[in-house]
Amino acid sequence: MHEQYRIEKERYLKVSMLLFFVLHAGIALGMTNIKIIKTVNHFSLSITQKMASASKPQKPTDKKLADSLFDYANAHIKKGDFREALSSVQQALNLYTTLADHKAIGHCYNKIASIHYFQGNYNTALAYFDKSICSYDKEDFKKGVASSVNNKGAIYYYLGNYPKALHQYKSAAKLNENLNDKKQTAATIQNIGGIYLELNDHANAMKHFQIAKKTYESTSDKKALSQVLNGIGEIYLRQQEFSDALVHFEKALSLAKEVGDKQRILEPTFNLGKLSSSKKEYKKSLYYYDLSLKLAEELKNLLYQSLSLIAIGSVNYKMGKNRLAINDCKKGLNIAKEINTVSVQKDGCNCLYDVYKSIHNEAAALIYYEQAIQLKDSLRAKETAKDVLNMEFEKQLLLDSIAHVEKRHQLKIEHKQVLHEKETQRNIGFGLGLIVSILAIGLLSRLSYVRKSKAILQIEKDRSEHLLRNILPEEIAEELKQKGYVDAQDFDTASILFTDFKSFTETASRLSPQELVEEINICFKAFDAIIDHYGIEKIKTIGDAYMAAGGLPKPDTSSVKKTILAGIEMQEFITKRKSENELVDKPAFDMRVGIHVGPIVAGIVGVKKFQYDIWGDTVNIASRMESNGVIGKVNISEDVYQIIKNEKNLSFEYRGKGAVKGKGAMDMYFVDNKVSVLNLEPSKIAQAKFDGPCKQ
């Protein structure tokens, strides 16, 4: 770009000098002003046209310049200068876009995504990898598509979303196998080994890593070999085979230094710190962790910055350096919050809890203990994703009962047919009349048997269909039937409803066991009918608590409103039921309802007695909305209020801020129909303004 500017500047100076010469020559020859102007205009027009022609973008020149900028970006990535790398690749992208070179455009998007990935900007990286895939598709460049798909798998892996990571890796592996690309196939096999490692399946992880290692050794790919040796070292470290772990980490580090790849140097350096800490060699551990922190800062790798800082804090705590430990863990925790890595945040909170507890600062210890518990709840979604992934590996255990029924009856029919044919052949010598009689009887028997078999099959099929749909949402049941397993799903906006009976134990003590079960059954059957009417999904009941969700398994823009209407109707039913019971002097329940909206993960866990369930921070907050509610009312969060505040048929009452465990103070509202179908009995709702958590 600088060279192009210099050439244009030289042209401009030459033209200016020529114009100056023409102007003075005209004066010297005694030309009039008008003639001089006409001459200058004519000359300048001629020069301008020539310059325009000469300065038109020449595709070969632009292509070379773009290629140079792209190579320049690669060089800066190796140095860890991501800002300069991003600037260069963006300039290259602009030039390639002008040239309509979709393959090169895909390379640029892939490179931009990689830069964001190294800096911990995972969502941005995913968006650019998707763009690269679209560009590669336009050129039918399968190798590029495979690369970007594999890289998306790496991001989902680091985010702990193993089902999505596995899906991306499998897609990439299939593309690479079709391309006969052994090197990339090995990379994908290595990535799948990484998932096994996270699932603590060390045998399968080692098997995949060794396959990849063999390929890298045959192709002398030192960078890739460094990475897979680091992975093998991690297996040995988890198995506490420290000497083998050390050999592999040091070899990985040596190879990474040979190729000068700082990102590859960072990973085994951090693991050497972890290994030294496991061996209680704390000074050596700090040495490696300090090196990894410096590298991470140089590379602007926020993930490893947070990991290194918290690891340094943990080692300082073990060495009794509490002040340093607090400082390092807080820094690491703040970075982990910035990039939203829940597992690292949890490690940071645990470290701070341990330190504050050791110095008898109980108040601070309690704060971080509660945060750690909250983060642990959030991580359950990821643990569930692991279970779902294991289901995928064991999907033969989840064969659908309908398929079994059909197969069993088909085999019986085929077996009966074979026996019948043999019988017919054996008796053919008895004469045509006898054969006709046997065939007639056989056909009638056969038709009767087929009809009975079909009827039995249909009954069993209907029974299985009904059972599945009674346990699972229809869409999930269909997926389970077709695939033998169900993929975990992310929902960005699901509305979660919780109900709970107040003073349940006290009320239950006044009922016989049979009466108690009957009363709960009446209430929950009514709730089932209400949510069925509003098209929201029952998730489960836990004792006297009832849980439902709107906006899944099919997203629905009106799900929040429907969930609220269902909650209001449930409260109205309980109020009416209480009035009926009081007329016959029978104990009755009061109930709280809470609703929150936000992202969740949904799926099926287990092989036996499996059920459709949901997990995530949104579920926890919805439960807190219920526990902070009051009887006879529906308590909602600020997020829910912002979505439905303009609904004309709903009324709202702001309660103020309520203390929510693990979240601090949150705004809450009561919501109700403006015109209720029931005359609700007066309650002490007006007294429920928050000075603190509501206690009923």
Image (spheres, grey):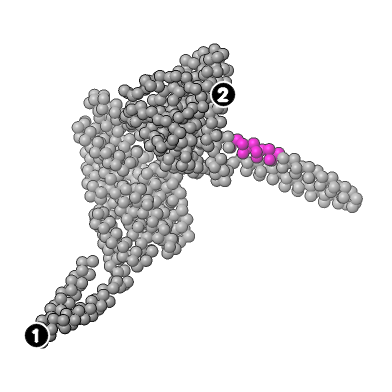
Asked whether residue 213 is in view, the answer is no
- Are the residues tagged 2 and 1 within 8 Å (C-beta)? no
Q: Is 683 inside the magenta-drawn segment?
A: no
Q: Which residue is more in the foreground, 613 or 422?
A: 613
Residue for badge 1: 28
The residue at 86%/51% (across/down) is 428
Please tell me how crowded label 2 is: few (under 14), some (14-19), or many (20+) other residues with Cα within 10 Å: few
- The region drawn magenta spans 456-468
Question: What's under tag 2, amino acid-wise?
Answer: Ile
Where does residue 143 sit, x and y in percent of width and height? 42, 60
User: x, y (%) of residue 160?
Assistant: 39, 42
Q: Magenta part mainly helix, strand or loop?
A: helix
Mark number displayed over residue 475 = none
Q: Could you say where residue 294 lies in the image, as x and y percent from the top left?
A: 22, 46
Three-letter residue code for mark 1: Ala
* Residue 233, quarter of the rendered image: top left
How many angstroms separate mark 2 from mark 1 (CA)?
112 Å
Q: Residue at x 87, y 50 (%)?
A: 435
Q: Earlier in the sequence, mark 2 or mark 1?
A: 1
The residue at the far left in this view is 28
In terms of depth relative to the viewer, which is nearer, 5 or 194?
5
Of the 4 image quadrants, the one containing the N terminus is bottom left
In this rendering, would 89 be left or right of 13?
A: right
Q: Which mark is residue 522?
A: 2
SS category of the residue bearing label 2:
helix
Whether the magenta-drawn stretch holds residue 457 is answered as yes
- Mark 2 or 1: in front is 1
Q: Which type of secondary structure does the marked residue at label 1 adopt?
A: helix
